[in-house]
């Protein structure tokens, strides 16, 4: 078992801005790629503001993720072409779930961890080359002023 790292330490290591979530792991032989699909709250509980200046609370993220998994479960390419892969792993880390897993506060953010098997050769080449280095979720919602 490896040493537990905080989310902040992982992000510092990847040298990504706090709102860009890099692909953390890939498996060339199996065409598997894993990372955070969305982060709603920092490990300290504070809200994350995305590139569109939106804030998504963890309850809404969890609801949207369940709907996505049940209704779709596929990977797309750049929000334009679907069917390039299949969802193989998905968990929304809420405070309740991390507590039930025995993960101490301050280790994981309120976030959605995902994994896909990429079936499209062209997309897999782009993942391997680093051209596609992060996940981007797509959806619609109603904006409420905070």
Image (tube, rainbow, N blue to C red):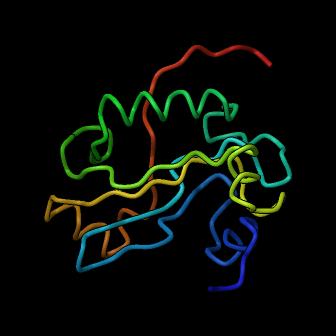
Figure quadrant of residue 71:
top left
> Could you tell me residue 86's position as x and y percent?
26, 50
Horizontal side of residue 30 vs 23, given as left or right:
left
Q: Nearer the viewer, residue 101 or 145?
A: 101
Estimate the x, y position of residue 141 in percent, counting from the top left.
53, 18
Q: Residue at x 84, y 57 (%)?
A: 105
Residue at the (52%, 49%) spot, across then down: 91
Q: Position of residue 132 (x, y in %)?
A: 36, 62
Horizontal relation, residue 119 to residue 25: left or right: left
Quadrant hosting residue 139: top left
As drawn, which residue projects farthest toward the left? 121
Q: Is residue 37 left or right of residue 80?
A: right
Image quadrant where one finds the N terminus: bottom right
Residue at the location (76% across, 45% down)?
95
Count of marks placed on residues: 0
**Given the current orientation, which residue lies at the most extreme bottom position?**
2
Where's the C terminus, which quadrant? top right
Judge by depth and name the residue closer to the eye, 111 or 144: 111
Determine whether, in the image, residue 58 is placed left or right of residue 87.
right
Q: Position of residue 6 (x, y in %)?
A: 76, 69
The quadrant in which residue 62 appears is: top right
Residue shown at the point (41%, 54%) measured from the top left = 89
């Amino acid at each position: 078992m490896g040493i537990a790292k905080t989310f902040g330490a992982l992000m510092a290591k990847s040298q990504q801005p706090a709102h860009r979530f890099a692909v953390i792991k890939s498996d060339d032989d199996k065409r598997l790629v894993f990372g955070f699909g969305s982060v709603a709250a920092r490990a300290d509980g504070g809200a994350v503001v995305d590139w569109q200046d939106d804030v998504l609370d963890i309850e809404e993220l969890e609801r949207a993720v369940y709907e996505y998994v049940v209704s779709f479960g596929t990977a797309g390419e750049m929000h334009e072409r679907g069917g390039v892969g299949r969802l193989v792993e998905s968990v929304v880390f809420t405070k309740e779930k991390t507590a039930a897993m025995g993960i101490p506060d301050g280790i994981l953010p309120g976030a959605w961890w995902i994994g896909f098997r990429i079936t499209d050769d062209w997309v897999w080449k782009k993942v391997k080359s680093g051209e596609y280095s992060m996940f981007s979720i797509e959806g619609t919602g109603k904006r409420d002023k905070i």
